Image: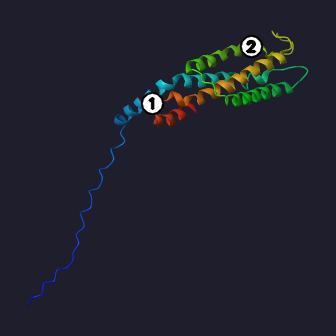
């Protein structure tokens, strides 16, 4: 009688082949797809991006440089401080007003942001080069406060509203993050 011993040998399958190396980051191949993605998003949100740009451009044209030049004999050196405080307060209030949901058309927001340019010459007319220089508005501080209030209210409202209305304009969910990054620069 002969004994045959068969050992239990288990064979494992061969390991899978290594994954192929990633394609090299090459400019000519990567750039067209990125430009195509960016252009498709920009076509959807360009009025909102332009509204944000024009709103803050006009604000930075006036605030704080020109507004700090408003002078008054009665208030003295406190006049620029009060004018800038009025701007900051009205800007803050207008940003809170955007909590009331109002759906604006993107091109209408752009038109409203562009219309703020009307405030620029009026604010400049409130600035007197010297105490004896020509001033077109009598009681300049009241006019300066009025135009600064309008500038602050329109800055807070039309600067925040395009960011709020951005989400419905972008069609694909994956593009919303990229559109939000671009408009928040």
Query: Which residue is found at the position 45% from the left and 30% from the top?
Result: 38
Say left or right for 30 vs 185.
left
Quadrant location, the C terminus = top right
Q: According to the image, label 2 marks what residue?
A: 122
In this picture, is 20 found above or below 26?
below
Residue 180 percent across, percent down from the top left: 54, 34
Gap in Å between the C-alphas at discs 2 and 1?
Answer: 39 Å
Quadrant including the N terminus = bottom left
| Corner quadrant of residue 25 | top left
**Circle 1 residues within 10 Å: few <14, some 14–19, many ≥20:** some
| Mark 2 surroundings: few (<14), some (14-19) or many (≥20) residues within 10 A | some
Please name whichever residue, 172 or 128, is drawn nearer the observer in this view of the structure: 172
Q: Which one is closest to the eye, mark 2 or mark 1?
A: 1
Q: Residue at x 85, y 11 (%)?
A: 138
The answer to which quarter of the image holds residue 17 is bottom left
Going from the N terminus, do you reach mark 2 or mark 1 first?
Answer: 1
Left or right side of 77 for 118: left
| Mark 2: secondary structure | helix
Residue 107 in the image: x percent, y percent? 56, 18
What element does badge 1 sit on? helix
Residue 172 shown left or right of residue 21 in the figure: right
Residue 20 in the image, given as x and y percentages of width and height: 29, 50
Q: Name the residue furthest left.
A: 1
- Outermost residue toward the right? 74
Q: Which mark is residue 38?
A: 1
Relative image position of residue 181 (x, y in whole percent): 54, 35
Q: Residue at x 53, y 29 (%)?
A: 168
Q: Can residue 18 be seen in this snapshot?
A: yes
Would residue 129 be visible to someone looking at this image? no
Q: Which mark is residue 84?
A: none
Residue 132 vertical placement versus 179 (above, below): above
């Amino acid at each position: 009688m002969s004994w045959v011993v068969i050992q239990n040998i288990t064979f494992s399958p061969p390991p899978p082949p290594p994954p192929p190396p990633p394609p090299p980051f090459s400019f000519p191949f990567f750039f067209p797809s990125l430009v195509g993605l960016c252009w498709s998003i920009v076509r959807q949100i360009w009025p909102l991006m332009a509204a944000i740009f024009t709103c803050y451009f006009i604000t930075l044209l006036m605030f704080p440089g020109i507004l700090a030049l408003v002078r008054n004999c009665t208030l003295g050196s406190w006049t620029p401080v009060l004018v800038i405080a009025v701007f900051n307060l009205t800007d803050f209030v207008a940003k809170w007003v955007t909590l009331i949901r109002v759906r604006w058309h993107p091109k209408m927001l752009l038109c409203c942001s562009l219309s703020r340019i009307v405030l620029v010459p009026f604010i400049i007319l409130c600035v007197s080069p010297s105490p004896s220089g020509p001033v077109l508005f009598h009681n300049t501080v009241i006019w300066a406060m009025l135009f600064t209030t309008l500038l602050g209210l329109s800055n807070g409202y039309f600067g925040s509203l395009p960011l709020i209305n951005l989400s419905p304009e972008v069609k694909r969910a994956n593009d919303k993050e990229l559109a939000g990054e671009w408009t928040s620069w």
